[in-house]
Image: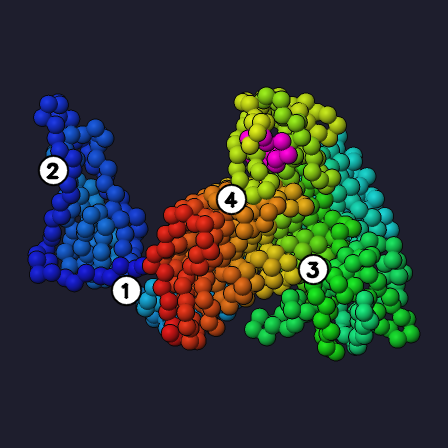
Amino acid sequence: MIKKAFIIPLFFLFSSLSVSSCSTNNDDNKKEIEVNGVSLTCSKESIYLDETCDLFVSIAPVEATNKKYSYTFTPSNLIEIKNDTVFPLSEGKVEINVITESGNYKDSVSLNILKRENTVTDKEYIKSLYQDEYNHDLYPTSKGWGLSELDNVGVNYDKLNNEELYKVPNKGKIYNAKDYKITFNSENNAGNLTLLLNELANVDGVKIIKFESGTYYMNSTILANNVSNVYLVGNKDTKFIYTGWMGFIKATNCNNLHLNNIIFDINPSPTITGKIVSSEEDDVYAYIYVNPDEEYDLSNEIYQKYYLKRTGSYAEYYYDDEYKSYIPNRNGNLFYNAGSTGLTDLTYDKNTKLLKVTLKKNFPYCSYKKPNKGVVVSVGFQVYESFGFYYLNCVDTYMENITTYTVGGMGLRTDNGKNLYLNRVNFIREIGTGRLLTCTADILHTCNLEGVAKFTNCILEGSHDDAINVKTFYTKITDIDGNVVSVSQTQNEVSISFDVGDEVEIYDPSNMSYKDTYKVMGVKTIGSNYDLTLDKKVPNKGSKNYTGFNLGNASKATRVTLDNSVIKNKRNRGILLQGRDSIISNCTFLNVNMGAIQVLGVDDVFKEAIVPKNIKIYNNKFLKCYDDIQVFTYGSKGPSEASNNTLKDCDIYNNFFYKSIGNTMALYGVGNIKVHNNFDFQLNSKTYTVYVHHADDVTISDNITYFASDVNAFNYVKDGGNNNNLLINNNLIKGVL
């Protein structure tokens, strides 16, 4: 909370004031070490009247016997100093001096005391927070609102649109695309570009492939194998339009590959939009008739081959008048998969020009509800068939100023490799089209990526599944012999590997309780499995038998930075984070339907790893999301049997929440979690903001909830039980009570 200014006492009539600070007592039995200098710094150069700042005094040498000092300041009526903290009293400029008792050494700093002008009303301030995705330069308020940085919540508009982080070098060999039969009229652009990339695999130095402004049509996936230091650089409005449902670029064993300034799209689109004309049903199936928008020609052969595909999706939407966009309706029909469950068939009638969608009514993930005529829907003719950008075993991959409108699958996927850097990489709905789906699966999906995944200034919109999924996989311990463990793969997506020196962690899959950390001393490969020699014995007897337990490679956990980005208008989660030492900051999550941020470690059919640690979430906006922040872990027995203190060290602060649906925050199976200086603005009554159970050492303090309507019983925290050292302090309610 902001500290109030002190009343000016009478002794401030003098031109200066001396304030003393105590020091440790001298030891008469020791030789006195004399002071030979002092330095003074201040935590801020300027402060407002409703703020404070701190002074820092450094006396030399550090071993000096007498470290006593005092302050003087001129003019004397502008501030008060207490315990090295400055309390402003009046506006103006003040010079602060420090003087040592021993030797009279001096140093000084200047501090500007400012008065807030044009203080906005509470109503204006709150509106500035929820009216859009962005932060705003200065909204001084008359009251504290919990937030520690009032003006730093949400996305910086200028950075989002203009910041360059990975510039194309001035030096390097230039390859003009047109010189290699890559032109606007070529029928084999993708093949010719693949040939060029193969040639460059044997060329040293920086290689820059330049594309002109205009549209390049691609009829196959571009392949890059074993290339290094290659830049694919477009110009203004350079577009790659793919004429089939396929991936854009597949890069294998590449190093320092860059993509800059290119727009990607698919025509005909693997996703379509339309309106419901009618529906009917029997005991097993529902039949929904959709009139596709005019931009889609479903008589095209590519749509007629849907029966050869294995997946698809169907989703109903509503229009959000507040944010002027179509949103997947979590209370409507959201069906996916193909075959015996979910979406079972798509049939187009060329005479009626209607698309017949057949749904299996007992779909396990969504209860069928008869839709109304005129409801807007999207249909995906693929879900997982393609990766827009696929990086396999690649090191140091960069993408900047890349826009994608449609992918029939995941937008971007990495398998293995190290370090991924994305800046101003957007997956967005193309203005002027009716398409609502951008990616039919996840947008950004990293699997077993070592090092860092840095996502800055990105807009991720309209995906069927997660906007971001960062993960690796657990292996399963199949045998233990002293300090040698045999482990097997739990998934066939990617093979989890180990190197000498890696740190590995063992978890009990029943409740995900942490058991121990080991260092890999030797690795023996047996097909896709391993015998790992560890630095100490592994229990294998009685109640301490780790056979069948999960083993994860902590050394290869991804370190994620998600900064100054927007995730919005989508069905599933915003970011699913299973990494370490990660930061989510200055982002906006808008109309995300299933957990804007999930930081989790669970044992389920996917066997995704690893239990996160050391996560910071701050300066973010959450606007009309279902379940804003979830930090949790549990095992095969479910949340009710979560293990305390498993997912540790998270700091959640200076976030703004608006119209939260479900839980604003849910914490369970955690330890050492701090939730502070957050602000909730809710239109309607709710009974709590944060739900906590199976948690150790959780501090929830200095948060504010504002209700715009009457609220009856409200506690900021709901204690779900099995908590130890749960500290709840100074969480306030404002507004209509």
Q: Alpha-carbon distance for marks 4 and 3? A: 27 Å
Q: Which residues are magenta?
A: 544-556
Dot 3 corresponds to which residue?
Answer: 365
Check disc 3 and report its element: helix, strand or loop. loop
Residue 253 in the image: state x and y as whole percent: 71, 34
> How far is mark 2 from mark 4, CA to CA?
55 Å
Q: Mark 2 against mark 4, which lies toward the viewer?
A: 4
Q: Amino acid at mark 3?
A: Tyr
Reading the image, the residue beneath label 4 is: 643
- Check whether the beta carbons of the residues at disc 1 and disc 3 lie within 8 A of each other: no
Disc marking residue 115: 1
Residue 601 image point, x, y percent: 57, 45
Q: Say which quadrant the N terminus sits in.
A: bottom left
Q: Nearer the viewer, residue 133 or 354?
A: 354
Check disc 2 and give the amino acid type.
Glu
**Spatial distance from mark 1 to mark 2, Cα to Cα?**
35 Å
What residue do we see at 79% from left, 75% from top?
Answer: 279
Q: How far across and how far down the image is residue 323, in percent?
A: 57, 70
**Residue hosting label 2:** 101
Q: Earlier in the sequence, mark 1 or mark 3?
A: 1
Question: Is 554 colored magenta in this rendering?
Answer: yes
Residue 565 within the segment the image draws in magenta:
no
Which label lies toward us, 2 or 3? 3
First-in-chain label (4 vs 1): 1
Of the numbered discs 2 and 3, the one sitting upstream in the chain is 2
Q: Secondary structure at mark 4?
A: loop
